[in-house]
Amino acid sequence: MSNTNTATTTHWKIMLNPEKHVSIDELRKISLSSINAVLTNSFCDSLETGLPKRKIQENLISIWSITDSETARYIVEWLLTDGQDVLYENIKKITVENELLKAKEELKKLSKNTEYIRKYEKYVENIYLFKKHYPQIEIIDKDLQKGIKAWDISRAIFIARMCLDIKYINQRQFDDYLQLATLEARNRYNSWKEYARGYLIGRAMFSFDSGLMDTIDVTEHLLRNPKSTWLYTGWFR
């Protein structure tokens, strides 16, 4: 695999570490974080992200409020065991079985808490907007049934890689997180394409904004570019 690659149809780069020393099995596991790696111009194929220490610290603090080992472990473990996939599970059946207006009506039957209903109505609406405005992604009921665990997994492993870079976690802890993420991914999805769709549904649910198009571009890049670690390793067997 060459050091870097840029597809002709996108400005996103798949950054590859010329000094990586990982097996193809470990590379496949690390590639669970590839979406977030590409979005941040980080290495896709090594434990090291390649980001400057100061940049890592800024990202962890500003986005995740991670300031030390304790907060690092808390966030990574929350994403891997619960994360926003737990929130999605509350609306999955309603989202799969109903059109938007009907889904909102069904939500009102779940709780009398208006704040709760308002939050979940927004999640449902965002998913419907995603399906409507990006039909090329071809989100089907099976994708909705599989849930958004990919959205949690990719972020968890990328955060863990950054934390390993600045020694907020050690190698043993990282390996444990990587193993748990791998089991979750294998149990939930059957291909990188399914994994990408799970990530996109989660991203759309969380926020239907202009940044979603960037994430779509990145997933398409990883699914099609010959230099992608996803294509190089294939899915888990």
Image (cartoon, rainbow, N blue to C red):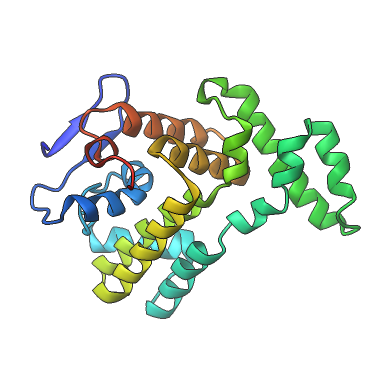
Number of numbered discs overlaid on the protein picture: 0
* Residue 13 relative to residue 213: left or right: left
As drawn, 145 above or below 128:
below
Above or below 107: residue 22: below
Q: Left or right: 195 with respect to 209?
A: left
Answer yes or no: is residue 51 visible: no
Closer to us: 94 or 67: 94
The x, y position of residue 127, in whole percent, is 65, 36
Write the residue at 49% across / 43% down.
Answer: 199
Where residue 116 appears, x then y in whole percent? 80, 56
Quarter of the image with the N terminus is: top left
Q: Residue at x 30, y 54 (%)?
A: 29
Residue 118 in sight here: yes
- Measured as percent of width and height from the top left, residue 200 is found at 51, 39
For image coordinates 44% across by 33% down, the residue present is 214
Q: Position of residue 162 (x, y in %)?
A: 31, 62
- Against 216, residue 170 (above or below) is below
